[in-house]
Amino acid sequence: MTGPEDRGHAEIEATYDMVARNYAAEYADDLAEKILDRALLSAFAEMVGRGALVGDLGCGPGFEARFLAELGLGVTGVDVSGGMIAEAQRLHAGVQGLEFVRGSLLALPFGDASLSGAVAIYSVIHLDAARRAQAYAEMARIVRPGALLLAVHTSAAGFPAGSVRRLEEWWGHRIGLDGHFIAAEEVLARLDEVGFDLTARLDRGPSTPREFLSQRTYVLARRR
């Protein structure tokens, strides 16, 4: 019998499989416009050091993963959606130090303390509180004393922190996907519980015309 957790996981996978090609095309040059995102990714790269092995967790079509690889890191992008992994492999074929594998935030395909760092850009927003806690614990498990860069949506018009927005159509596809708005204080508390200390926090609104009109928080943390 399938439980609520399995159904939620299947919704995430099915949705991103359907929209993978649209998503990759829509956001192909998005990072070029995101000055603050590039700055934080660059700071993360400096924290872990050139040549470090890191994971991009919930990598989507792999744009942040490629950026980090071009800064000299060894990057493995992980996503639950096979469609997203296929797009990432297609778009970034031949980029040195970069690979993509299918996997879940709840059971990451890395050994204990095997990475120097990880990034998780908006990847926990589709998980409820219990599964977010599990994902944070997995991040702590795989990162030996090193760095984590994580981003979440915190609020939007009509959606305060703690609320859920149900998306049922995306680029003409009929889908079912929950997006959670997560208080920054909750993120910081949960990360502290699993062994991450805050290095820096950035709160910002939309920075490109294509971004969803939300407030969001980026957390750069160091593993104890």
Image: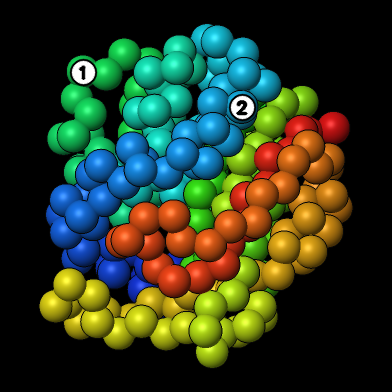
| Residue placed furthest toward the bottom | 158
Q: Mark 2 sits on what residue?
A: 43
- What residue do we see at 39% from left, 28% from top? 67
Q: Earlier in the sequence, mark 1 or mark 2?
A: 2
- Which amino acid, by three-letter code, is at mark 2? Ala
Above/below status of 216 relative to 219 = below
36 or 85: nearer the viewer: 36
- What residue do we see at 16% from left, 59% from top? 22
- Dividing the picture into quadrants, the one containing residue 32 is top left
Q: Residues within 10 Å of mark 2 (few under 14, many from 20)?
A: some
Tell me, for residue 196, which label it has, or none: none
Horizontal side, residue 157 vs residue 65: left or right: right
- What residue do we see at 50% from left, 56% from top? 122
Residue 1 rendering spot, x and y as whole percentages? 45, 81
- What residue do we see at 40% from left, 68% from top? 212
Label 1 to label 2: alpha-carbon separation? 25 Å
Residue 74 rendering spot, x and y as whole percentages? 46, 18
Residue 69 rendering spot, x and y as whole percentages? 40, 21
Which is closer to the viewer, label 1 or label 2? 2
Q: Mark 1 sits on what residue?
A: 94
- Quadrant into which the C terminus falls: top right
32 or 144: nearer the viewer: 32
Residue 192 in view of the camera: yes
- Which amino acid, by three-letter code, is at mark 1? Gly
Residue 210 rendering spot, x and y as whole percentages? 31, 61
Horizontal side, residue 177 vs residue 173: left or right: right
Residue 8 in view of the camera: no
